[in-house]
Amino acid sequence: MSGLLTFIRFKDLVNWSVKNYLNSNLLQSQFELISLGKLIKIRQEKIKKDDYKNDIDLVKKISFKDGKIHLREERKTGMDLYNVYPNDLLVSKINFHQGALSINEYSNNLLSSTHYQPYIVNKNKVDLKFLTLALRSKQFQNAMAVIKSEGIKTEATSDFIKSLKIPLPFLKTQQRLVKNYQSKLDLAKKQNQFAKQKEAEIETYLYQELGIELPKEEKQNKDILQFVRFKDLDVWRVTKQNKTTFSSKYNLIRLDECCNHFKNGVNFNKSQFGSGVKFVNIKDVYTEKYIDLENLNRIDISQDKAVQNLLQDNDLVFVRSSVKYEGVGFPSLIKLNNENDEVVFCGFVIKCSIDTSLIIPDYLLYFLRCNLLRKATIEKSNKSTITNISQPELKSLQISLPPLKIQTKIANHIQTIKDEIKSLKQQAEQNQKDALNEFEKEVFNAT
């Protein structure tokens, strides 16, 4: 009865906080709560820094996100280490409360710093996967967060960890729960793989419809002097001489023959950020298709500058400057919700207006995003501290121009495939969530 005095044995206390003790027993389950000390045993195989070779598999970290052990590429170290055997439970002493724990799924021994602690798991009592799922569950980690705030300020000691309890059904039930969990993840994996196959289909379909033929790669002897004809030079840099070329059964035109009004955006400083008119920044261009107008930030600029840099419906925007080489020149489309929408664009973005009498905006976007055109765009960029592309370089991109009817057919078909891809990814994401939710619901009576 909650109204009566409750006695607690001294050996059951981890620290002297009553709130800590009560919260550590908040886990609800239809299964018996068993202390980890009955399931795991500390492995104390410390290796002195002078007693091992450099060709070791050294643990770099345990990911909070997926609970996987990641190894260091540089394996030299100057510290004492712990031996971690296959199927050992490895726990971060500092970040255990955040789910930094994992089973060593490698087939060989690992070595970890003493910031981690390996444990031998009694596999006759607990399934390895069940154990990590329970310890990384929301319910268990919520309890750990309370305990952390109450009393465990530094490392989680082995005595503390072994005193914690988890719900423990019979081994066959554990295995069934893990199997159900894994089947959902396997289904999600297949759906993501199918989505990738669909993405490859887009590229194949586009090239087939346009009759695009790629030149065969010519093998060059890099040990001898190579000559480049003057008329083949675009710029006076050696790195710029490799050009992506292609042919098509339709006419090839320059981008500036179907687009006009190329313009760099407005520059601003930090004090102008946060209020005023909506603006498109670099990060806003990396979208599935259209710029997300609802989640744009704002800048405070004069009415004259705003008018000079307003984006129109169906405008095409490119990333002008990118920290990542592969991000430069990435395109997206503007679709305004109504005539009263006012959106400008920043100086690290280039915009142009599409001549819709010649080319369908969706078709142009899909074509500019195909691997062939992305490669051609990146080749035209200039790399220093960051990678930049200029208006003249964008204007010179070659575009395959089929009749409008063919463009519409291509754009609609690609959109259908993209809708299928989106659906597959959503299903995969939902199955991943369901896998964990269903496990926690059955083990912890979670709602």
Image: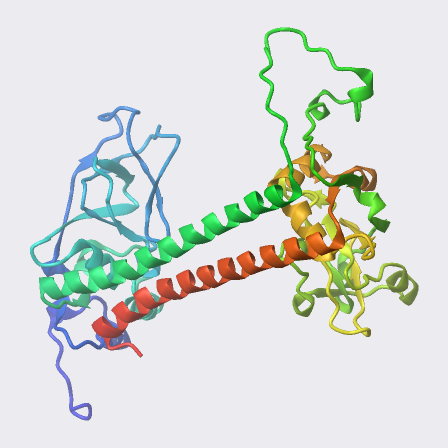
What colour scheme was applied to this rendering of the protein? rainbow
Q: Quadrant of residue 191?
A: bottom left
131 up-or-down from 223: above or below: below
Residue at image point 21% right, 33% down: 47
In the depicted view, which residue is nearer to us: 76 or 277?
Answer: 277
Instruction: Indicate the position of residue 107 as horizontal and vertical percent values.
Output: 21, 37
User: Which quarter of the rendering shows the C terminus?
Assistant: bottom left
Q: Is residue 245 left or right of residue 205?
A: right
Residue at image point 73% right, 59% down: 280
218 up-or-down from 66: above or below: above
Single out the residue that lies furthest toward the right: 304
Q: Is residue 81 left or right of residue 124?
A: right
Residue at image point 24% right, 26% down: 52
In the depicted view, which residue is nearer to us: 58 or 312?
Answer: 312
Instruction: Indicate the position of residue 29 as horizontal and vertical percent values.
Output: 19, 76
Q: Is residue 246 left or right of residue 133?
A: right
In the depicted view, which residue is nearer to us: 422 or 391?
Answer: 422
Q: Quadrant of residue 337?
A: bottom right
In the depicted view, which residue is nearer to us: 280 or 162?
Answer: 280
Q: Is residue 122 left or right of residue 430?
A: left
Single out the residue that lies furthest toward the bottom: 3
Single out the residue that lies furthest toward the left: 124
* Residue 121 appears in the figure: yes
Q: Quadrant of residue 157?
A: bottom left
User: Which quarter of the rendering shows the N terminus?
Assistant: bottom left
